[in-house]
Amino acid sequence: MRRLLRAAVNSWKGLLAAARSEAAFRQELALLVLSVPLALLITSDPWKRVSLIAVVLAVLVVELLNTAIEKLADHLTTGTSPGIGRIKDMGSAAALLALVIAGLVWLTAAAERFLQ
């Protein structure tokens, strides 16, 4: 039980650190706050609601991993490195793709709800 509590505290610290230091993460948190009531409006199907919220949570997960990669890279070297730059770009691309996936899911659900 103690290990579980420590893991939860460390996770909370990580979320706070990301929220304090990353504007993109804060914006995506705001998106999550908006997505919950919007999911209730868009569909009455519980699985669709869960899916709409889950894709936003997935965006947050990818953003956290991208942020961790960037922070680690910055810790390893303060200078310019083409290899580190490519690694950071790949993390950024992953975050972009997660946003695209979330957008497609939300657009599909909205179109199904409002265009029929």
Image: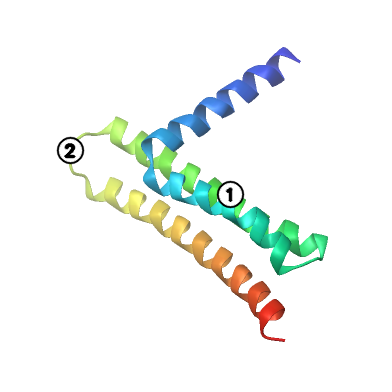
Estimate the x, y position of residue 28 in percent, counting from the top left.
Answer: 49, 51
Q: Give the position of the C terminus as an image quadrant.
A: bottom right
Q: Which mark is residue 56?
A: none
Colour scheme of the picture: rainbow
Estimate the x, y position of residue 99 in percent, counting from the top left.
Answer: 50, 61
Callout in the foreground (2, 1) = 1
Q: Looking at the picture, tell me which residue is in the foreground, 86 or 112.
A: 112
What's the CA distance linking mark 2 and mark 1? 37 Å
Residue corresponding to mark 2: 79
Amino acid carrying label 2: it is: Gly
Left or right, 108 with respect to 24, comes to right
Residue corresponding to mark 1: 33
User: Which residue sits at x=53%, y=54%?
Assistant: 31
Q: Looking at the picture, tell me which residue is in the foreground, 67 or 47.
A: 47
Tell me if residue 51 comes above or below residue 70 in the rendering: below
Q: Give the position of the N terminus as an image quadrant.
A: top right
User: Which residue sits at x=44%, y=30%?
Assistant: 17
Estimate the x, y position of residue 37 in percent, counting from the top left.
Answer: 66, 56
